[in-house]
Image (cartoon, rainbow, N blue to C red):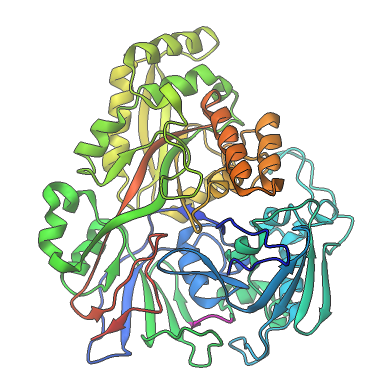
Amino acid sequence: MLSRSKTGAFAVIAGLALLATGCAGGGGGQTSGGGPGGSIAIRGCEPENPLIPGDTGETCGGKVVDSLFTGLVEYNPDTAKPENAVAESIETEDNKKFTVKLKQGWKFHDGTEVKAHNFVDAWNYTANSANALAQGFWFEQFAGFEDVYTEDPDGEEGPKKAPKPAKDKLSGLEVVDDHTFTIELTAPFPVLPSKLGYTVFSPLPDSFFKDPEAFGKKPVGNGPFKFNSWTNHAKIVVDRNDQYGGAKKAKVKTIEFRMYKDDNSAYSDLISDNLDFTEQIPTSALTGDKWKSDLGERAIEGEQGVLQAISFPMYDERFQNKDLRHAISLAIDRKTITEKIFSGGRTPATGWVSPVVEGYKPGACGKWCNFNAAEANALMDKAIAAGWKSGDELPMYYNGDADHKPWTDALCAGLNQVLQGKVKCTPKPFPTFAEFRTEVDDRKMDGIFRSGWQMDFPHIENFLTPLYKTGAPSNDGEWSNKAFDAKVEEADQEQDPAASIAAYQEAEAMMAEEMPAVPCWYYGLQAGYSTKVTNVKVTPFGELDVYSIDTK
């Protein structure tokens, strides 16, 4: 999109991101050939939540939801730049109040037309904390948010409950007519129009409100594919929407999102032509570039906006000591792990923002992301003096249904050796990503845990606000810093793009002294496809372009 305002204020690429993951399930089965427009099977994983846009904040569900729904804006599969989708126009004179006009005739899969109230009603429902959808915080900048969104004052484990919201609708949303509505924010935010391509801003049909629970199991969207079936821990199947209202039309008839217990099983199916696409090449195949010899010209290599980090549960007072957090970061030999475990398929991180995005600044982490055994031990001694018990177990949690075991084993072994037994790092996998995320969301972590982040737009804001602002939806460690929050808000409201970027960079610099999460490495892109498909394109977000791919 990048709709220009009447004053020409929009000069920032934006959007949103999903939690990056490895996924679940089993494999096997066959894919179809026999000419164009056939069926394909791609690597998928079990969604954490029902298939509702406002309840989906991770890639397992996001892959599916993105195929089922289309928002006001979509992102170019080559450049990641936002382009109008359901929106005919998004205009503003002050970057605070926006007028949205919709294209007429766009239909949901049930045949009803997508109208202005379908966006407004969906957003009001998602923002209202009484409905308990995971992504309600994304409407924080909308006028009236504080009246519809309340938080539990003592968390899920405490006896108190979140107060009932004062209102059930955002005052900043107003339907003008069937194809026009307005958005009012609490302060100017030039990035908003391009951010509206994120999944949470999708429309919902009237049928959703009759039975939201049933809808989540069998969603009705307005996207290029229609929901067919969901077999838990096995597969999700979607069919091409031949009445799709967008300019681009999908070529394949059916997509099966097939769930696997591990990346090696998926890769085995890929090279046997029993799977048509995966964006997760296992470390065993990366060694010696085996995957390139296996796949030949069907091997896809490049860059993507994904960062691997390790988070701390700040709700556990042991991890509130920043000397401990800095010691752990300094004790990680990123260079050795990326070279020996990933065969160069990852790059040591020097900050919390991916190099592929606008606003990336190398070295934002400073010395804290450089391997330094001596300083790590000195800081660990300070942490012990402050209360950490030398030799205490340090659990390292991750989801075991993806290829995280090799690097978590290496990382823990390194910590134990470098820190001379002052911590006892122990890898602890959860069977599936969904189970892992449930424990993270329920704030039950008693150790460090992996936290990947996959961009949906190439902009620094997306790697900071959702993850580290107080109360943000993906602030899994519950880090809170008033100065950081204020600097991010300053950057949000800055009208000059360069000044805005500079303010975001200042916010990232603040994180170096606090180390709310440890940046580990940036992902390279390694993907592959079967001999049965053609026109395979991977977007800058590391995802398959479902419009381009076709069967032979």
Percent x, y of residue 279: 31, 61
Q: Residue furthest front?
A: 7
- Is 336 contained in the magenta span? no
In this rendering, is residue 431 above or below 405? below
Q: Residue at x 37, y 54 (%)?
A: 304
Between residues 473 and 178, which one lies in front from this camera angle? 178
**What are the residue bounds of the magenta stretch?**
222-227
In this rendering, is residue 441 above or below 16? above
| Residue 518 falls in image quadrant | top left
In this rendering, is residue 81 above or below 150? below
Q: Is residue 56 visible?
A: yes
In this rendering, is residue 351 above or below 227? above
Specify whether 441 is left or right of 300: right
| Residue 28 falls in image quadrant | bottom left
Specify whether 88 is left or right of 167: left
Quadrant (top left/top right/bottom left/bottom right) for the N terminus: bottom right
Q: Residue at x 14, y 59 (%)?
A: 292
Between residues 241 and 409, which one lies in front from this camera angle? 241
Q: Residue at x 76, y 46 (%)?
A: 151
Number of numbered discs overlaid on the protein picture: 0
Percent x, y of residue 25: 36, 63
- Is 223 contained in the magenta span? yes
Percent x, y of residue 150: 79, 49
Between residues 191 and 408, which one lies in front from this camera angle? 191
Specify whether 244 is left or right of 168: left
| Residue 191 falls in image quadrant | bottom right
Percent x, y of residue 190: 68, 55
Q: Is residue 393 visible?
A: no
